[in-house]
């Protein structure tokens, strides 16, 4: 087991390196000159080349990538100008290891930018996850138990609709109409959980609903299908025959047997969502990782783009590993 | 100057042609002293974040206006009044608008005694000198206007640039020290490289504002501007999300004849889309009652806010921008062909495509009607509607093969598509074969400035940095400062005419301001008559504000943005 984990972690690190290299290469393949963006309207070729030098963009991709790696282990100074550091030390922004770089457009370290964005995206993702798991699995169970009745049919219809609406549409409706125009939901926005738990909850309610809606619909259907399978199985019949209470039969025997495949999918979905909150963040003007990266792409802000890609990739590969390990926990037949 | 910054800002003002486009706004607004009281919190909600708050790095009208009225004072400034009168520069930190030498190369200003920094220390000549010197540190203080580099009398290096690299590295510091002289703490003398008859207007830009050396944090100053205005930053400023301004206890009201500073507090928020900014303002709930915006009304909002119940809290303004077409003289060397294009275009149809009279009015010159250099003229006698038949006759007489193929490049959106389609029809009637090429708005100006990518006909817009032809004709039409191997700069027509260049030098050297403005007008007419520039529209912007806002005023001199000097919420 331990050897397996070590092997996987090494593979993950190598893969993240590869992803960062590809991101660097792609960035230099697309048009747009970051040095031009730092130069005002009265720009001259001399100023552009001066700014390119100040940003370190005059050096080759390999050297720049080397600086990036060096910063990860040893930290960096921005601007990397020994003369300025000597004469005006307070102008220099030091970025501790693991330094992810410096964003020219935001004029701060990527660590700061992402440090501020990560809690937003995590709150959004985890809240939405809890919401869709509770509501999705709960309604799925209800639907299975009430199979063929009006509740079941209603749920199947509603989930189809919920599943069909794109996130940006649901988000805009909740934001513009429900929250802004009629004030039916609290005004969306992000407040730190530690600062104001009530504000955190009410501000994220609409974004959670937006993000969770499609997944809820999916999990209702998934849970229902798994539950119908297990409720039809022999051991459930045995449990019923033993005279076990109906709720215990459904939850302890029916639902429990249905959970492993749901958990597996949930692990993958939460990773996917973590990398795909951008639309929801944009609609609700939340400064999460997704909207930060989108703005960075517009501004040719490479350090943020690379970090954003790495975060999304890390989430996917790490949660994949967790899911694989959970298999071994829930299913004794699996051995690593 | 000012291109509008992002694609989001370059949104067309798409309005019903029937809307009331009452040029300069309504008389009951913008009347300082009309019952405004001190107190309360004013909210400023903008779609686009203020890219730089550092005065030496700030180059957009909305930010220049915002900070000039709150935390940054300049030697001279624009008065808080409506219409073209706002371009009549008044003293701010200085006691008057300066004394100049006969050759307009030496300018002397006396500072008022009671202008104070937020810590109570007086603002001195040394602070202005230090602030202006920061512009030269282009590696750290990027993005700002570079007029100081050109104007101040500092020896040039081999590449023709000023031989001074700013107060941090101090190469050439002695030369810079000679260009701005501080004979006493309250006296400042500028020594310029060539005559600048409108230098007192140049000094309205925050790029020429004071910065205290001990408070300068270089690249970090953007979030930590140390104030000498009526407000100061509370805590720190977030470049993306804004911040809160509170009163500067050391600001002396009697030292300031422009800023009334009515609200106790100003809170800015950025990041909503323009549509959301207007939806919130329309709903007028809670803090929205006390809200103004620096984002002009998006097409959907403009139609509703200028009439009906919101009429009383909306206003439109001539924002100083001129939309124009450039005809590339390398690709269309025949003057008659260029003139034929100018004769064929229908400006009224163009204005209609952009939303009618609320969006702007037909323009005949590159210089805005707001400026003293403006002259109304009709070089080809075809009026605003144009005359494709006359154009066709000129084409036939010119001896070129018809149909004459041209490509029209424009920044693509629904409005511009409509205007471009009209243009294509008009030009094809006159004997052209037009290919339309709508380009990505985000990179539009870079593409049309690229000599290998630009086409025969391109669209652009421009507004002056300060109300003078000096910030229109030279930056757009002087080929020497614009054109290099890799770029056309702002000169999308690739126009580099020795006679024009010489006339620009002559105009710049004029010491009589009125004569200089006449010279700019003459040059304007020259490039228009040559068919190099085809002016299309003088644009307007529309704004909505909360129901509790009093003394709302749009200042044309800053590009028609809300003037916080006189806005109150009580």
Image: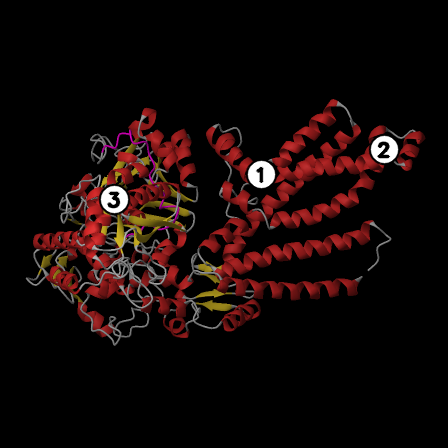
Question: Which structural element holds mark 2?
Answer: helix
Q: Is residue B368 magenta?
A: no
Name the quadrant of the N terminus of chain B. Answer: bottom left
Give the x, y percent position of residue B267. 38, 42
Residues at marks 1 and 3 on the same chain = no
Residue under mark 3: which chain is it in? B
Callouts 2 and 3 close, C-beta under 8 Å: no
Q: Which disc number belongs to residue A249?
A: 2
The answer for how far apart the CA atoms under marks 2 and 3 are is: 80 Å
Dot placed on the residue nearer the N-terminal end, 2 or 1: 1
Q: How many marks?
A: 3
Give the x, y percent position of residue B112. 16, 53
Q: In terms of image quadrants, where is residue B301?
A: top left
Q: In terms of image quadrants, where is residue A124?
A: top right
Give the x, y percent position of residue B131. 27, 61
Q: Is residue B479 left or right of residue A66?
A: left
Residues at marks 2 and 3 on the same chain = no
Q: In the figure, B163 relative to B324: above or below?
A: below
Residue under mark 2: which chain is it in? A
Q: Which residue is mark 1?
A: A166
The answer for how far apart the CA atoms under marks 1 and 3 are is: 43 Å
Mark 2, other Cα within 10 Å: few <14 / some 14–19 / many ≥20:
many
Q: Which residue is mark 3?
A: B345
The answer for how far apart the CA atoms under marks 2 and 1 are is: 37 Å
State which region is magenta. Answer: B1-22
């Amino acid at each position: 087991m331990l050897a397996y984990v070590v092997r996987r972690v090494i593979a993950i690190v190598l893969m993240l390196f590869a992803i960062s290299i590809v991101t660097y290469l792609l960035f230099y393949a697309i048009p747009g000159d970051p040095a031009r963006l730092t130069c005002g309207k009265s720009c001259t070729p001399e100023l552009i080349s001066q700014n390119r030098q100040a940003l370190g963009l005059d050096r080759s991709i390999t050297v720049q990538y080397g600086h990036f790696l060096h910063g990860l282990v040893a930290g960096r100074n921005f601007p990397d100008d020994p003369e300025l550091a000597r004469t005006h030390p307070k102008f220099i922004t030091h970025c501790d290891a693991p330094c992810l770089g410096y964003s020219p457009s935001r004029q701060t370290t990527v660590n700061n930018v992402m440090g501020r964005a990560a809690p937003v995206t995590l709150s959004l993702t985890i809240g939405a996850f809890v919401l869709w798991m509770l509501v999705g699995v709960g309604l799925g169970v209800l639907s299975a138990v009430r199979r063929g009745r009006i509740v079941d049919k209603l749920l199947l219809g509603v989930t189809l609709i919920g599943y069909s609406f794109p996130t940006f549409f649901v988000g805009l409706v909740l934001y513009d109409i429900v929250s802004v125009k009629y004030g039916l939901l609290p005004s969306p926005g992000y407040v730190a959980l530690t600062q104001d738990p009530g504000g955190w909850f009410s501000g994220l309610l609409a974004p959670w609903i937006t993000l969770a809606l499609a997944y809820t619909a999916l999990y209702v259907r998934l849970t229902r299908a798994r539950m119908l399978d297990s409720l039809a199985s022999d051991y459930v019949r045995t449990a019923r025959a033993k005279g076990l209470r109906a709720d215990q039969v459904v939850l302890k025997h029916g639902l429990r047997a249905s959970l492993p495949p749901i958990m597996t999918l949930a692990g993958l979905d939460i990773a996917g969502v973590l990398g795909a909150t951008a639309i929801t963040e944009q609609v609700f003007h939340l400064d999460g990782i997704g909207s930060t990266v989108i703005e960075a792409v517009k501004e040719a802000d490479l350090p943020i783009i690379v970090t954003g890609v790495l975060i999304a990739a890390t989430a996917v590969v790490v949660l994949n590993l967790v899911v694989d390990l959970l298999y071994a926990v829930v299913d004794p037949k699996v051995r690593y | 100057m000012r291109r509008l910054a992002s694609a989001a800002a370059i949104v067309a003002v798409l309005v019903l042609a029937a809307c009331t486009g009452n040029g300069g706004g309504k008389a009951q607004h913008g009347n300082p002293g009309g019952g405004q009281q001190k107190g309360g919190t004013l909210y400023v909600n903008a779609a686009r974040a203020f890219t730089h708050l550092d005065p030496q790095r700030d180059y957009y009208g909305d930010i220049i206006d915002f900070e000039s009225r709150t935390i940054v004072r300049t030697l001279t400034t624009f008065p808080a009044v409506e219409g073209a009168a706002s371009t009549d520069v008044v003293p701010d930190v200085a006691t008057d608008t300066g004394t100049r030498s006969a050759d307009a190369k030496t300018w002397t200003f006396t500072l008022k005694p009671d202008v104070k920094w937020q810590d109570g220390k007086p603002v001195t000549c040394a602070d202005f000198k230090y602030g202006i010197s920061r512009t030269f540190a282009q590696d750290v203080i990027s993005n700002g206007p570079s007029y100081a580099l050109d104007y101040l009398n500092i020896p040039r290096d081999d590449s023709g640039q000023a031989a001074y690299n700013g107060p941090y590295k101090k190469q050439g510091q002695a030369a810079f020290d000679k260009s701005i002289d501080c004979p006493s703490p309250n006296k400042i003398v500028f020594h310029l490289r060539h005559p600048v008859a409108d230098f007192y207007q140049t000094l309205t830009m925050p790029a020429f504002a004071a910065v205290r050396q001990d408070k300068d944090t270089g690249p970090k100053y953007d979030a930590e501007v140390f104030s000498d205005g009526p407000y100061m930053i509370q805590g720190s400023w977030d470049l993306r999300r804004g911040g809160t301004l509170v009163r500067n206890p050391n600001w002396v009201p009697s030292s300031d004849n422009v800023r009334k500073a009515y609200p106790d507090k100003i809170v800015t928020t950025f990041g909503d889309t323009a549509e959301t900014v207007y939806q919130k303002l329309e709903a007028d709930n809670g803090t929205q009652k006390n809200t103004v915006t620096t984002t002009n009304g998006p097409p959907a909002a403009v139609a509703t806010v200028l009439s009906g119940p919101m009429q009383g809290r909306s206003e439109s303004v001539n924002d100083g921008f001129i939309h124009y077409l450039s005809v590339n003289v390398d690709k269309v060397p025949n003057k008659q062909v260029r003139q034929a294009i100018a004769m064929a275009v229908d400006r009224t149809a163009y204005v209609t495509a952009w939303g009618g009279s609320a969006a702007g009015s037909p323009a005949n010159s590159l210089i805005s009607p707001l400026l003293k250099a403006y002259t109304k003229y009709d070089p080809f006698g075809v009026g605003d509607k144009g005359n494709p038949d006359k154009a066709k006759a000129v084409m036939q007489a010119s001896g070129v093969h018809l149909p004459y193929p041209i490509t029209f490049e424009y920044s693509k959106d629904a409005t511009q598509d409509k205007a471009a389609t009209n243009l294509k029809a008009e030009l094809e009637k006159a004997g052209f074969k037009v290919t339309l090429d709508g380009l990505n708005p985000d990179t539009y100006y870079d593409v049309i400035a690229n000599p290998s990518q630009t086409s025969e006909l391109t669209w652009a817009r421009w507004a002056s940095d300060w109300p003078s032809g000096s910030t229109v004709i030279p930056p757009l039409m002087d080929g020497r400062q614009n054109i290099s191997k890799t770029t056309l700069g702002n000169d999308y027509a690739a126009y580099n005419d020795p006679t024009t260049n010489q006339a620009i030098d002559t105009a710049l050297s004029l010491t009589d301001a009125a004569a200089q403005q006449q010279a700019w007008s003459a040059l304007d007419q020259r490039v228009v008559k040559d068919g190099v520039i085809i002016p299309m529209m003088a644009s307007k912007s529309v704004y909505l504000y909360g129901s509790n806002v009093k003394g709302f005023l749009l200042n044309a001199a800053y590009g028609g943005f809300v003037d916080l000097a006189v806005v109150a919420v009580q």
